[in-house]
Image (cartoon, rainbow, N blue to C red):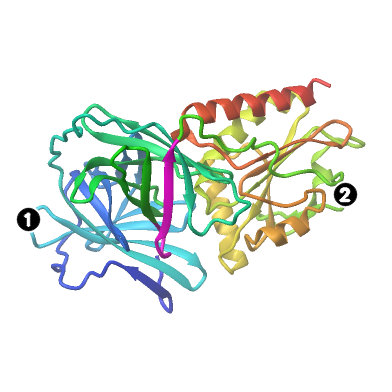
Amino acid sequence: MKRTGAVCVVLGGMIGWPVAAAPPEPGVYDAWLESRGGRVAFTLEVEPGLRAARVTNGEEVIRKGARVEGESLVIPFEPYGAELRVRASEVGGELRGEWVRRRKVDEYTTVAFGGVPRAPLPLVRPIGFTLPERWTIRFAAAEPEDASDVGVFRMMPDGRVHGTILTTTGDWRYLHGTLGVSEAGRRLELSSFSGSGATLIRAEISEDGRVMRGRSYSGGGEAREFVAHADEGAALPDDFTLTRAVGRPDFDALAFTDPATGERVSLASFLASGARGPMLIHLFGSWCPNSNDAAELMNEVCAAYAARGLVVVGLAFEGTGDAALDRERVAAFCASHGAAYPVLMAAGETDKKKASALLPFLDRVHAYPTSVLIDRRGRISAIHTGFSGPATGEAQASMRRRVMAEIERIVGE
């Protein structure tokens, strides 16, 4: 990854680390990124031949191709424009390196990486305490009108915790960590490294086990404080009510850029002559993990309903600051997911107010991804906001059933 002239934000310094000597040996490592709040832990497996590697976050396994560049093993995470650079240090068996993400054409985030040969230790569940599974979570920076988030955590027999946080814009994907005892009481520590970014949560749990106070660290930003309350009925608002239709889409007027040719293409060109639908317009960003999760569902929708006349079109909202780089990211997104639907470049920025102005038939764009379902008469039938990914379990299953039911309804008219 070329970095000449880049602006680098470094989280967790590398001063004092031994000089790297060679690419790492194949094997399994306890790995981490040095975030502002501490170490974001995950498991890294370097496969024999150094041509692939696996990142494990609790129940999630991400397998990526790899290549050797000089003294580093480079593991790319596309389409995020990110890569993990791993080297063996002079200390026997240890790894050093960095995770680098190109956020804009001249802006990079760099985070220090470390690892040691895996040596899992047995964990002991705190005696007499079971972590409640559902929590209502409120972040200090949230606006009064914002819905509370929902934490879903499952305690494993060995004391480890798996889970995620659901929000109205999507989920936090696979979180994993431990529940232990600190001087202040019980402490929950969760982390995740998706390749697109790193997340760390540290929280103290009250004596009665019903209140949690803590901080989350994500990306290069400052800590976000939160308070959570155990709540078995915790739930988000209906994700089909968050964005409303305020008119009908004019398919002839709605024209966006074909990333392959640079030409303007109208949405009407994807419909048969005289047809007004059915169509699914899918708003997404290649930079967004939830959008990457949603691509699989969009492919399934195409496979199930294209023969019945449904047209799926993706509208990409990118934000690197460079049109060529945006197109490169979108191409990588389509290739990574084998996109079975056409994708157009809607905008070179992700500002939701500006995105709303491009789509005047919506009252607002609340999240990426958003899917707009249009019936055969050209009317908006349903709008689904956000996406519940595979880490959410039943929440994803319920969402998929609802989306498919709405599609079935409009194609069956």
Q: Main secondary structure of the magenta part?
A: strand
Residue 227 part of the magenta segment: yes
117 to 156, vertically: above or below: below
* Dot 2 crowding, Cα within 10 Å, few <14, some 14–19, many 20+: few
Q: Secondary structure at mark 2?
A: loop
For the residue pair 373 and 252, the one nearer the viewer reads as 373
- Considering every residue shown, the one lying at the far bottom of the view is 5
The percent coordinates of residue 57 (x first, y second) are 33, 41
For the residue pair 208 and 11, the one nearer the viewer reads as 208
Q: Which residue is identified by label 1?
A: 92
Q: Secondary structure at mark 1?
A: loop
For the residue pair 147 and 364, the one nearer the viewer reads as 147
Q: Amino acid at mark 2?
A: Asp
Q: Amino acid at mark 1?
A: Gly
The N terminus lies in quadrant: bottom left
Specify the segment rendered in magenta: 217-230
- Considering every residue shown, the one lying at the far left of the view is 92
Disc 1 to disc 2, how far (Cα)? 64 Å
Residue at position x 39%, y 40% in the image: 174
Q: Which residue is identified by label 2?
A: 252
The percent coordinates of residue 411 (x first, y second) are 78, 24
Drawn side of residue 235 relative to residue 305, left or right:
left
The C terminus lies in quadrant: top right
For residue 286, say whether it is visible.
yes
Residue at position x 15%, y 72% in the image: 16
> Which quarter of the figure has residue 408?
top right
| Among numbered discs 1 and 2, the one appearing first in the sequence | 1
Contact, CB < 8 Å: mark 1 with mark 2? no
399 to 383, vertically: above or below: above
For residue 338, say whether it is visible.
no
The percent coordinates of residue 163 (x first, y second) are 38, 36
